[in-house]
Image (tube, grey):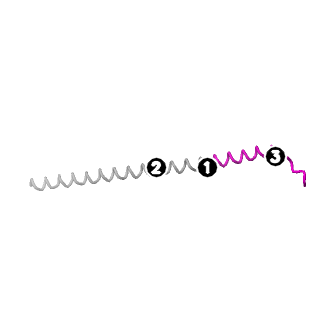
Amino acid sequence: MAKRNKAQQNTTKAAKTIKDGADAAFDAVQGAAEAAESAAMNTVDKTADAVNKALDDEEDDDDKRPVNTFF
């Protein structure tokens, strides 16, 4: 009976160790995925900002261009 209890305790301890390791691995993967998502979203935001700024600058430049009098 004592051997059986010891074996059950060892099995339970091993299962907990495996689960703790898997939990840590999943947390690391989740953290990396969240970091990648954040970087991607920031890139999209910065790209949109740059395009909008370029369009605003182009619109401002249109007002400063001389009118073409050749046509």
* Mark 3 and mark 1: Cα distance apart in space: 27 Å
* Relative to 7, 24 lies left or right: right
Residue lying at 38% horizontally and 50% vertically, measured from the top left: 28
Which comes sooner in the sequence, label 3 or label 2? 2
Quickly name the residue at label 3: 65
On the rendered image, what quadrant is the N terminus found in? bottom left
Stretch in magenta: 47-71
Question: Which of 58/22 is in front?
Answer: 58
Quickly name the residue at label 1: 47
Residue lying at 72% horizontally and 45% vertically, measured from the top left: 57
Which comes sooner in the sequence, label 2 or label 1? 2
* Mark 3 and mark 2: Cα distance apart in space: 46 Å
Q: Which is more foreground, mark 3 or mark 2?
A: 3
Quickly name the residue at label 2: 34
Residue 38 place in picture, x, y as percent: 50, 48
Tag of residue 27: none
Q: Which is more foreground, mark 2 or mark 1?
A: 1
**Residue type at tag 1:** Thr
Question: What main secondary structure does the magenta stretch of the protein show?
Answer: helix
Residue 70 place in picture, x, y as percent: 90, 53
Residue lying at 13% horizontally and 53% vertically, measured from the top left: 6
**Residue type at tag 2:** Glu
- Residue 68 sits inside the magenta stretch: yes
Secondary structure type for disc 3: loop
Figure label count: 3
Residue 3 place in picture, x, y as percent: 10, 55
* Mark 2 and mark 1: Cα distance apart in space: 20 Å
> Around disc 1, counting alpha carbons within 10 Å, would you say few (fewer than 14), some (14 to 19), or many (20 or more)?
few
On the rendered image, what quadrant is the C terminus found in? bottom right
Residue lying at 68% horizontally and 45% vertically, measured from the top left: 53
